[in-house]
Structure formats: C-alpha cells, structure tokens
Image (cartoon, rainbow, N blue to C red):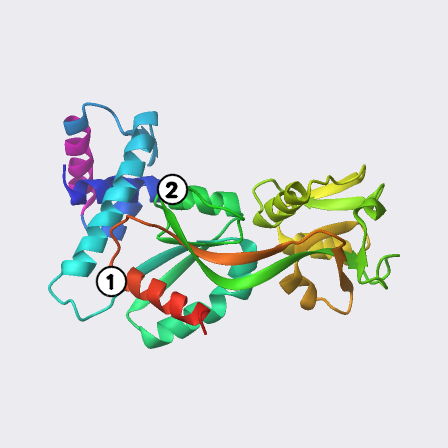
Amino acid sequence: MNIAELEALKAVAETGSFTRAADRLGMSQPGLSRQIQRLERELGTRLLERRGSGAVLTDTGRESMQFAIRTISDFDALVSRFGPDPSALTGVIRIAASSTPAEFLVPALVAEFTTEHTGISVEVLVADSAQVARTLGDRQADLGLSGMPSFSVGYTAVSMSKDEVVLAVSSKHRFADQRSITIDQLRDENIIEREGGSGTWQTVVHALSSAGIELPEHKVSMTLGSTQAVIAAVEQNLGVGFVTNHAVKHHADKVVAIRIDGLSMERDLNLVYETGRVRGRHTQAFIDFASTSSSK
C-alpha cells in the first residue's frame, strides 16, 4: 500500500468515475485501474463497485476511504513541514464552519491571511455545528469554526469572537418595543426553531438547562436549517426565533433583538482543531494568525 494508491481510491470516490479521476491525477485510466486493483489485492476485498461508466464505494471501500483521507492528510502535513523547501508556505487549508462564523468571521479572516500568504488557498465548507464536529472527526477538514457550547476531548478551541444569541421578532410583533421579556411570555408563541445540530439552538438549550428553566408551552411553526432562513421567516412575522445578534444587526430595519430575563446566552465563536494531529506549516500558520487576530 502506498500514498498513490490511496490517492487513486480517493479520486475515484470523489469523482465517481475512473476517467475523471485519472484526469484529476494526470495519469492514464489503465494506470489508475492498476493502482486500485493492487490496493484491492493487498486488502483482499473489493473497494469499488463498477456501474457502467462510473463507480461507487462498497461498504469496505467507505471504511477504507476514511483511512485514505486521514493518511493523505497526515502525509501532506509531513511533506509541508519537512519538505525540500521549508521556507515556502503553500498548500490548501480546509475549514468547516457553522453558519454564523462562516458569514461574519471567515471572509475577512481568510482574505487578510491569504493576502499575506499568497501560496495558500482556503476551502470553506459551511455546515451546522454538529456537522463541523463530524467533519473534523473524520479528518475531512483541517480546522473548524463553530459556536458549539462545548467540544470533544482531544480538541483545542481558541475563542475568535464573542457572540450572543437573542430572540428575533418582527418589527411588527407585539414584543418589538420591549428590550426584554420573561420566559413565560413565550407561552403559546409561534417559535421558529433551528435543527438539532445547530450551535445556536444548542446554546439556547444549554442556557435553559444552566438556569434550571424550560420553555413554556409553545407552537413550533417550523424548523429551519440556517440563521438566514429563520431571519427571513421572522421578517414576515411568521413567528419568533433564536438567532445570533450578528444576524439581527444586518436586518435592524425589519427585525428586533429581544433578551430573555434571567437567561444568559453569550457564547464564544471558536477556532477548533485536533490537539495531537500532525499539521503542515501552512495550517499551523493559519492557527497562529487567527489566534493573534482574536487577541487584538
């Protein structure tokens, strides 16, 4: 087994085609097929199921793909750190970001970093906070940016910015002229919820638990997958919803931020990475840059 064989498997899995995978790797299709065949012989199992002109991973192939992703990532990090030109910072950094940091932190941070380090490119995957955690765990991303209240053991979290979760209501809503309300005033309200993997919703759940209180009986008018979707529904006065204060500020003419008495929903937006993982110098450079930026 070698890196080239693992890269061949990864390319076929990601493109779904031997032809496209060969083009991506700059080699002939027969050469690519031989690498896959050698890997399958070494493992003693079929990794890909050929379907017409395409191919899909078998169950064993999916497990092997996760190993390939981790191994290629670690190999790239070693090459970056100990390669023949240690002074050049080049490479790709993959960041998984939840919606709030993806919208309000990432653009300026990445733009400033890549201006200083022109040989480095950054790929950003936007997902909910639970997906960010899974993506990091599967090593399909090098770094994460998330507002999740807590993270798994084995990961380091660096606070990049403070944030607050508030109740967003339409400027036409009966709460719009109030700075805060009691939790009981939400009784029978139409609440627009976020999906369970949302860091924003987890912050609400965590705050309620810490305060020893529960949401009163209410109506869940809908469950939406992004902050912007919640804001859009609130603007139309379809209900109220918990969102980041960053988002409300961008819609201040139509949406009002309300706080809940006795409920603290401040949180950190964190840069998260695997503590013991071998990282390339280009990825470590981003961590150092982001950490310095957060302390300014």
Residue located farthest toward the right when viewing the structure as drawn: 174
Near-viewer residue (267 or 29): 267
Q: Position of residue 197 (x, y in %)?
A: 56, 42
Q: Looking at the rendering, which quadrant does residue 174 occupy?
A: bottom right
Q: Position of residue 25 (x, y in %)?
A: 23, 51
Q: Which residue is at 39% across, 42% downward?
A: 153
Res. 26 visible in picture: no
Query: In the image, what residue type sits under mark 1?
Result: Arg
Quadrant of the drawing holding the N terminus: top left
Q: CA distance from mark 2 to mark 1?
A: 21 Å
Q: Which residue is at 72% across, 41% downward?
A: 213
Quadrant of the drawing holding the C terminus: bottom left
| Position above or below: 230 against 6 | below
Name the residue beneath numbered marker 2: 137
In the image, which residues are magenta? 28-41
Name the residue beneath numbered marker 1: 281
Q: Is residue 175 left or right of residue 72?
A: right
Query: In the image, what residue type sits under mark 2?
Result: Gly
Chief secondary structure of the magenta portion: helix
| Position above or below: 144 against 210 | below
